[in-house]
Image (cartoon, coloured by chain):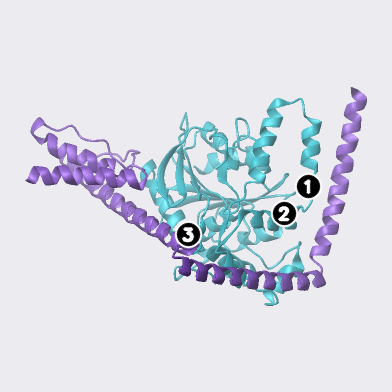
Chain colours: A purple, B cyan
Amino acid sequence: MKQDQSSLKNLMNLGVKYEKKLNSLIQDTLNDKNFIQLANAGLKQHTRTLKSLREFNEMAAQQLNIPTKDDVARIARLAIQLEEKLDQIQLQLSDLMDRKNHEKDRGRSFHGSRRQPRTLIPEPEVISDEKTEILSDRLNLKELLTPMDHATFLNTLETTLTKRRQRRG
Amino acid sequence: MADFPSNTSRIAVWKKNKAVLWHYPSPQKKYNTPVFLVYSLVNQAFILDLGPGASMIEGFTEQGYDVYLLDFGIPGYEDKYLTLDHYIIDYIQTGVQRALMHSGTEAITLTGYCLGGTLAVIYAAVAKEPIKNLILFAAPVDFSQSRDMNNWIRALKQGEINVNELIDEYGVIPAKVMEYALKMVTSPVSFTPQLAKLARADDKKYLEKWRRFDTWVKGHVPFAGAALKQLINDLVKDNKLIKNNLKIRGQRVNLRKIKANLLVVSTEGDQLIPEELIKPLMAKVTSVDKTYKRVKGGHVTLAIRGGIPDFLSEWLRDHS
């Protein structure tokens, strides 16, 4: 057992030593000026190949009437922009609610209230029965502020708007 | 993310594109100033919470700090236009604002790792938000000297090599290309980790940690092309950051504007980011309270050792 451990330790030491030597050798070769020139020429050729492939792909996609990678990326960017707009709305809503709560607190207490840790989406307030419908609307709108995928977001938004339209006749 | 769940309990407080701002609440909160972590754009952030007994985040929360981690996620082809400006202003600055709002505190301790540290430095120099402390681990800021691959850097600076067109063609640099490029700089051949695994083959706990670490090592993420071009041209080639010439969304990044308490950490065995890329920052900031610490270990040793090192614990306790 002891002999096994000793052999393993020796193997480790040898491994560390030769790994270091091998890496130095490879890095010296890679850092050689002639190699850099060669690699630079290779990179240029690789760039030209990529460019030709992309141009061919774009041309073929146009003829076949199919979207390219860039077309798909453009759609994805639209979704990202939408998400950013929602994020801004969330922040503005949060800010408004913060101000509202602050004003409420000022009204209640002469000294005001201490800042407390809070989530970006405040808990719903308890309100009287006659305001239930408005509360339901508000809850639905608050639901929209929680992280969710776009399909769920659109469904929730649509449900809320339909309910409001129906109520208004 | 990795194929194993987060070690420390957390909740997502903000999402943007692929990025998530995670909150790791402390089970026994002792300090008001939360720690805001910014990780690199090259690897995945789960290295900071690798597993039980191998998590820096767990170390922070156990000592009474609330932690916020900005995980940039894995960029897709649609993110090829993302620049450093986007990462600094739209992600880090907004993330800090959200963390301040969520925690209800007055200031944060901004902590950056590797390239995340460089981003943290740039942000700290343009920030309007209150940053009480700035902690940097292996964050490269001065690219005037380079020990390894110096001929490549020279060729790049002299314009003999121009990778802009190649990056444009790729759009987003594939994860494998990033992995091989970094491997060439640090360790092209690496078999000693396998020998270490063999030596402790009967230690289940070690093997689990080894497996998680290996997943991280091989888990590079794609790099947004526009950000990489900016990094190569502005930071490496023209060394604009340390010269105070870098501009982020039209605003000049002046390192003298950094006044937060500063702790800069470098490790002796770091093959990727040697000391000469990190230390020059100390002379460039106006922070009155600044400490430079050189410790034993490699590039990620501190992150996976488990807990937080004593010097960091003491420094944070005195500054939080």
Q: Residue at x 73, y 64 (%)?
A: B146
Can you see residue B58?
Answer: yes
Q: Are marks 2 and 1 in contact (CB under 8 Å)?
A: yes
Q: Are marks 3 and 1 on the same chain?
A: yes
Along the line of sight, the residue nearer the viewer: B235 or A73? A73
Dividing the picture into quadrants, the one containing residue B315 is top right
Q: Which residue is mark 2?
A: B183
- Label 3 and label 1: CA atoms lie apart by 34 Å
Q: Which mark is residue B190?
A: 1
- Provide the chain ID for the residue under circle 2: B
Query: Residue A166 placed where, x, y %?
Result: 11, 43
Instruction: Indicate left or right for B192 with A138 as reference.
Output: right
- Provide the chain ID for the residue under circle 1: B
Image quadrant containing the N terminus of chain B: top right
Q: Which residue is mark 3?
A: B78
Where B219 falls versus B127 (above or below)?
Answer: above
- Label 2 and label 1: CA atoms lie apart by 9 Å
Which sits earlier in the primary sequence, circle 3 or circle 1? 3
